[in-house]
């Protein structure tokens, strides 16, 4: 399957610059994918955008909700038991 998103988590503020560099590297290599960041060192959605991400999630459920908003599952994929983003 195609890569749709990358999720990154940082718990210590000392690692925020590495997160910024990682976001930039992902963006350069795979500009079409979404980058979601979280963890206790990332304050909120605005901070995530400043770090180079497309979105912020404060939990696994938050990541799921964000990805579902960006890539809704097709009704046929859900019905057939697949997890395929699409129409």
Image (tube, helix red, strand yellow):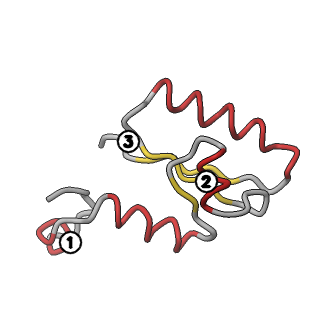
What's the residue at 44%, 47% (across, down)? 5
* Label 3 to label 1: alpha-carbon separation: 19 Å
Q: Residue at x 60, y 37 (%)?
A: 23
Q: Percent from the top left, x then y, of residue 12? A: 85, 53
Tag 1, which secondary structure? helix
Of mark 1 and mark 2, the one earlier in the sequence is 2
Q: Residue furthest right?
A: 14
Residue 11's label in the rendered image is: none
Looking at the rendered structure, which numbered label has been put on residue 78?
Answer: 1
What percent of the width, then of the height, locates residue 48?
63, 52
The residue at which mark 3 appears reads as: 3
Q: Which mark is residue 37?
A: 2
Callout 2 environment at 10 Å: few (<14), some (14 to 19), or many (20+)? many
Residue 72 position (above or below residue 36): below
Viewer-side residue, 1 vs 52: 52
Q: Residues within 10 Å of mark 1 (few under 14, many from 20)?
A: few
Q: Quadrant of the C terminus?
A: bottom left
Q: Residues within 10 Å of mark 3 (few under 14, many from 20)?
A: few
Q: Is residue 64 left or right of residue 39?
A: left
Residue at (77, 63) in percent of width and height: 40
Say whether disc 3 or disc 1 marks the residue closer to the N-terminus: 3
Q: Nearer the viewer, mark 3 or mark 2?
A: 2
Q: Residue at x 88, y 45 (%)?
A: 14
Position above or below: 43 against 9? below
Q: CA distance from mark 3 to mark 2?
A: 16 Å
Residue 47 position by quadrant: bottom right
Task: Identify the secondary structure beneath mark 3.
Answer: loop
Relative to 6, residue 47 above or below: below
- Which of disc 2 and disc 3 is earlier in sequence? 3
Q: Nearer the viewer, mark 1 or mark 2?
A: 2
């Amino acid at each position: 399957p195609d890569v749709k998103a990358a999720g990154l988590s940082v718990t210590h503020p000392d690692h925020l610059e590495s997160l910024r560099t990682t976001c930039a590297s992902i963006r350069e290599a795979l500009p079409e994918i979404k980058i979601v960041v979280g963890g206790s060192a990332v304050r909120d959605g605005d901070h995530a955008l400043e770090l180079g991400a497309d979105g912020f999630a404060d939990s696994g459920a938050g990541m799921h909700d964000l990805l579902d908003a960006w890539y809704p599952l097709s009704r046929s994929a859900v019905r057939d038991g697949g997890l395929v983003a699409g129409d």
